[in-house]
Amino acid sequence: MDNTTIKQVEPARGARKENLAGYIFVGPLFIGLTVLTIIPTLLSLVLSFTDWSFIAGFDKIKFVGFKNYSMLFDDNVFRISMKNNLILLLVVPIQLVLSLIIAVVIDRFVFFKSFFKVIFFLPYISSIVAVAIVFQLLFHPSYGPINQFLLAIGVKNPPLWLADIHYALPSVMIILVWIGIGFCLIVYLAALQSIPRDLYESADIDGAGSWTRFMKITFPLVSPTTFFLLVTGLISTFKSFDIIKVLTEGKPAYSTSVITYYLYTTAFENLKTGYASAIAWFLFGCVLLITLVQLNVQKRWVNY
Amino acid sequence: MDKQNKIGKWIATILLAFVGIAFILPFVWMISASFKPEIDVFKYPIDWIPKHWNAYENYKDVWSGEHPFALYYWNTIKVTVLTTLLSLLVSSMAAYGFSHLEFRGKNFLFVIVLMTFMVPSASILVPQFLIFKWLHLFDSHTGLIIIGSFSALGTFMLRQFFMGIHKDYLDAGRMDGAGHPRLFMGIALPLVRPALATYGILRFIWTWNDYANPLIFLRSDKLATVQIGIQKFATESGAFYSLIMAGTVSAIIPLIVIFIVGQKQVIEGVALGGVKG
């Protein structure tokens, strides 16, 4: 309203002033994002078509077209890392099921709600480095508390966890589920609280049991939340880096290597800037794909 | 509530309490190990409450030993506090601009801001590294602070709250002849204080826990943050697990304190925005 009055009196000057104020307010963010995100994104696209190492200097840059991308598909380590990334995505549905169960229990069946919220949220706010170091000890093959416990209750040959090719990735997944439950739980609890109580009351009058109530009321009404958590979970799990770097460094024998970790070693240890940029754009492509699928599926799948 | 229901609720509470305790056992183990002499760390059955106490010696060793833990701490506090403040300033300014100002290209710029949100940080590490080298920001706290301070997520989150401010409040200020800087500082910011607190605490936690950025953009040991410090400490002190646990406890404690103080804001923020760092 105020804008129009100003415009009527002094159209040009008022609008120009408002324009200037606008640019001043969003300017810092925009300059920052340009330098830190937009230019790097484009630069990494350009670099992905080159054979180059950043220690070599710009005169050594060599454009090789799509060679880096075609190399990706013949690269065994890359393929293993991609496969591991896809397996890791299983973490998300497990997290969702467990956190929804706990959320329903906290919401309806217990005292001290906020105490339980804090307990389950603790891993999420703790640093991944600290968590990874603690789990390295807990999972220690010979004297870690987990295996000592398993031996004590009579398990003859407990798994070697992070030291075993077959158990290393599942161990990482257990830790990821543990870290992420709190976040899903808090979001689910907020969703549960927004379900109108009289829906449950009328279900009670109709004589619906707990299970029917859950399947007919709770589950459909939290489906937008489930969908949201599914998408953000898939994206953030796909981008996991810290946990792998600190916990396993992709070992043993690449059994826990993931794309971001392979990107990191390619770029900063093997110093193949061009090739690393192709991996970077592949990663970006995967995240975009998940986002696009999300936008398409959202309307059909979710009950609002 | 009838009596039967109440008993049921107590039983459920007790059962869930067991699940909860099992859930945080790794933390309990960590704290307990940090209080023990080295030879008791892996003793089985586990002494959850240490039989022999060695807490003072462990923590003293960590804090005044070879690895300058106090320095790592100070570095982290400096970087985290400055990142949080700068990020709040940049994001709230932009959020105000995008919600209460009309300027040419506003929607276009906002779409671009949202698009940057989709770029995974790992995808741009290499070019960021190159740009930081050119700008002489590599291996400096300034660089690390800058990298954490320009957040599309924070802007988006705060914008939702700025949009909740009714135009009348700002119009009243404009009648008194206030320009945008004064409207922003004097009227808008105080009205969204709870949102600032929420975002500030989340940004603090994320920056404190950040591992990838210090790993890549810092090199000197004297600039290292706690996350880098404890990892180094864990790999270099070999088998001194009680000390390593004292280090990890030290790294987590400030966050637990902040979380308990700002619990309401954190949980509300996460629940409302459904944000994820």
Image: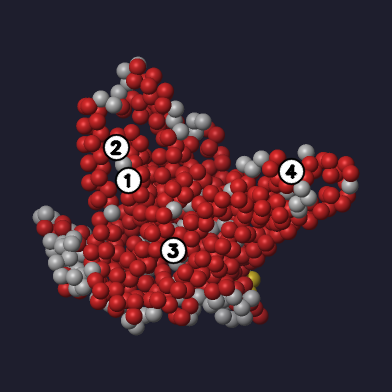
User: Do the residues marked 2 and 3 share a common chain?
Assistant: no
Residue that carries the numbered disc 2 in the rendered image: A110
**Residue A148 on image: x %, y %:** 16, 61
Report the residue that reaches farthest toward the front. Answer: B176
Q: Secondary structure at mark 3?
A: helix
- Asked which quadrant contains residue A275, the reply is bottom right
Residues at circles 2 and 1 in contact by the CB criterion of under 8 Å: yes
Please name the residue that numbered disc 1 is placed on.
A116
**Which chain is disc 1 placed on?**
A
Query: Quick check: A268 above or below B160?
Result: below
Closer to the eye: label 2 or 3: 2
Is label 2 or label 4 in front?
A: 4
- Going by the numbered disc 4, the residue's amino acid type is Asp
Whether residue A258 sits left or right of residue B26 in the image: it is: right
Relative to A280, say whether B20 is above or below.
above
Q: Is residue A189 visible?
A: yes
Please name the residue that numbered disc 4 is placed on.
B171
- Residue type at tag 1: Phe
Label 1: state its secondary structure: helix
Left or right of B174 on screen, residue A175: left
Identify which amino acid the numbered label 2 is placed on.
Val
Where residue A173 appears, as percent x and y from the top left, is 34, 54
Q: Quadrant of residue A261?
A: bottom left
Q: Residue furthest top?
A: A206
Report the residue at 45% width, 59% height from top. B205
Which residue is labeled 3 in the image? B209
- Residue type highlighted by circle 3: Asn
